[in-house]
Image (cartoon, rainbow, N blue to C red):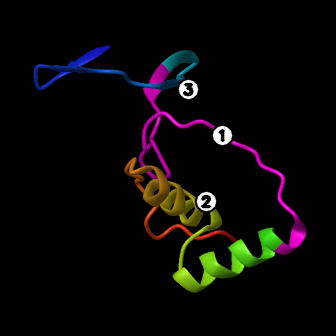
Amino acid sequence: MIAVNSVARRVDCVPVSQNGRTVRMEKKRTGRPSKGPRKRVQVRLPLELAAALEEHAEQAGLSLNDYLGEMAAQWTGVPYQDQGVLMAS
């Protein structure tokens, strides 16, 4: 932990060789921010149903994951935070 502006935060470091000595430098974080703890759920669907869901997700401008998350949120009443602009490739 490193204290920065009186707030402790975790810093990921990578070893780097500098003048024959190994020093640790902070790793730059890339990618989207975490949406918090998630659980991977795998389902097996009939091909026709899977294709229909993929088409509906595409029409809605969502990834299949976000589309199903939104549907599940409406069904259960539990909020779902989508991935925003990320799309399935």
Residue 9 versus residue 85 in the image, above or below: above
On residue 65, which mark appears?
2
Q: State which region is magenta.
A: 24-48
Could you tell me the amino acid type at mark 3? Val
Q: Residue at x 40, y 47 (%)?
A: 78
Q: Nearer the viewer, residue 84 or 74?
A: 74
In the image, 31: left or right of 2? right
| Magenta stretch, overall SS | loop
Does residue 5 appear left or right of residue 88 in this picture?
Answer: left
For disc 3, the marked residue is 16
* Label ID, residue 40: 1
Give the left or right position of residue 1, taking residue 17 as reference.
Answer: left
Q: Residue 46 location, x and y as percent?
A: 87, 64
Q: Position of residue 79 (x, y in %)?
A: 37, 51
Measured as percent of width and height from the top left, residue 58 is found at 62, 81
Q: Nearer the viewer, mark 3 or mark 1?
A: 1
Crowding around mark 2 (Cα neighbors within 10 Å: few <14, some 14 to 19, many 20+) is some
Type of the residue with mark 1: Arg
Q: Under tag 1, what secondary structure? A: loop
